[in-house]
Image (tube, coloured by chain):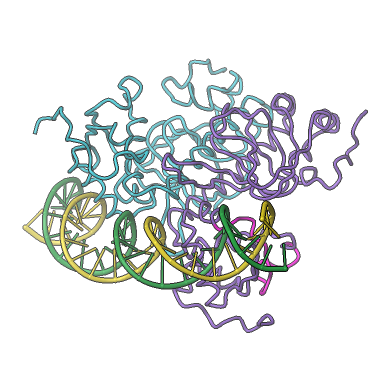
Chain colours: A cyan, B purple, C yellow, D green
Amino acid sequence: MRKPRSSCPGCPSREKGLCGALADDDLCRLGSVSRQRRLRAGEAIHIEGEVPPSFCAIVSGVVKLMKSLPNGRQQIVGLYGAGDFLGRPFGGEARATAIAASEVEICWFPRATIESLAASSGAVKDWLLEAITDELEKAQEWIVLLGRMTAEQKMAVFLLQVLRTAPEARAARVLARDRAIELPLSRTEIADYLGLTIETVSRQLARLREGGVISAGNTRSLIVHRPDVLAAIVDGTQPQAYAAPAPVQVDA
Amino acid sequence: MRKPRSSCPGCPSREKGLCGALADDDLCRLGSVSRQRRLRAGEAIHIEGEVPPSFCAIVSGVVKLMKSLPNGRQQIVGLYGAGDFLGRPFGGEARATAIAASEVEICWFPRATIESLAASSGAVKDWLLEAITDELEKAQEWIVLLGRMTAEQKMAVFLLQVLRTAPEARAARVLARDRAIELPLSRTEIADYLGLTIETVSRQLARLREGGVISAGNTRSLIVHRPDVLAAIVDGTQPQAYAAPAPVQVDA
DNA sequence: CGCGTCATTGAAATACTTCAACGACCGTGG
DNA sequence: CCACGGTCGTTGAAGTATTTCAATGACGCG
């Protein structure tokens, strides 16, 4: 009957996520009511203004949290990946809409289960507290980016962030040259994330390409030749013209 | 020896703040190690990169949380007032600098006390969780403001926010006409809050003045004649030219 | 093959910034 | 008391980054 500690093998929530903070019997309780779900890109998980009936953990894929303005413009206020948790214990209705940005697998629990789990377990509250604190810190960094950075700097931050969260990031140093990356977002989504227009995003990428900092694969992938230049752009060194093109050229 | 529930009379943390969530004996424990402190505008409470030795509750005044960029530009990432709590249970070093924006009174506790309090009391954790969740939601709204709003809209949001948090806000409806308000921030601070330059802030206020939406007191105070116009500016109705000047004129 | 979506590129418009000068306010010290 | 210097806010003019509008190109799918 009991689920052993080794249940959900390979699920990112088991190690770094919420489920790792759970005692065995709580994990069992959660496991018995959880349901896996697979979403296609564009499908909504919960919608602004509605009370989400559930919490969920992201098993794989990327989810974007968005807010819309009356005029129809949108802004992505958060991005979540494998191991991240979606939903808040307090707060009735959702203040933003969560949508799958790629194909996404989620693990899905009734609201009441998590709430009673949190009520009985200090460890669960601790985990939630820490997760939300992290999220707040990221949000504050994003505030700085949106308030005080140029389009060029925003683009550089974004690319470095993708570099950092790429699958083989731990092994290869973030500043290693000539690394290929997959962009988790479309141009429109990048624009909504960085507070720019899609055209500006496109032009900034073109500029980086011309400067030899990156080179294009297809639209969803590219190679970052000079992450050091991206970093220099972010802290405002590297004023305008980029350094000499990457010495190591890829085949072309 | 025990502090009765009626201790710290008038302190905003007792009703809506953390101290309201405390059991009597915990409150006593906290009271015995707390110290009041008064800060002048500009004094720092804790500094980015340093481990704050303490937590504190704001008794009166306004505290700004700021982050600095390498180029020296600054961005306010949060604003805290009476009853708000400063400091996080997790997280060693502070990720931002907290500075008194006005004359401020704080109630000050050693880090260890709060941490042990949180460890033993579920109610304290709940309070922290709720407080941080609120803060995150505000941060996300600010992300939308910074990413997608024009200077005019940002200014309108700011004025409405001041209107909402003004002392007599509960009594007078937020949308009541001709209310006088005190600005809690200097022009420079408003600029750092809204992600603008000081000149743009000044010009937007001038425009609102010309349109009869507000009128000037001294630099730190003004009268909002038409909060409804401010609201219309925020949702993008009220394209450019403002409505007719306020029918009710102040003496002049 | 043609259509729809998504990305790129160009040219013009514009919102905001930057640079600069000026005015108001405030406390200090003569 | 008034002159002085400093900080802070306002205003103007010029510059620039980003947006907007518009056209074209690439890709995928029926």
Q: Give the camera-side residue of C24 and B132.
A: C24
State which quadrant residue A60 falls in: top left
Residue at 57%, 78% in the rendered image: B212
Residue B86, position in %: x, y? 66, 38
Residue A31, position in %: x, y? 53, 26
Prevalent SS, magenta region = loop
- Whether residue B38 appears in magenta in the rendering, the answer is no
From what the image shows, is residue A108 above or below residue D25? Answer: above
State which quadrant residue A53 falls in: top right
Is A205 left, or right, of A57 in this rendering?
left
Quadrant (top left, top right, bottom left, bottom right) of the N terminus of chain B:
top right
Is A193 left, or right, of C22 in this rendering?
left
Residue projecting furthest to the right: B1
Q: Give the camera-side residue of A35 and B5.
A: B5
Residue at 85%, 33% in the rendered image: B24
Q: Give the camera-side residue of A221 and B71.
A: B71
Quadrant (top left, top right, bottom left, bottom right) of the C terminus of chain B:
bottom right
State which quadrant residue A174 falls in: top left
Q: Which span of residues is magenta-colored?
A: B170-187
Residue at 66%, 74% in the rendered image: B177
From what the image shows, is residue A157 above or below residue B221? Answer: above
- Whether residue B175 appears in magenta in the rendering, the answer is yes
Number of numbered discs on residues: 0
Q: Give the camera-side residue of A64 and B70.
A: B70
Residue C6, position in %: x, y? 26, 51
From what the image shows, is residue A31 above or below residue B219? Answer: above
From what the image shows, is residue A105 above or below residue A193? Answer: above
Residue A194, position in %: x, y? 38, 48
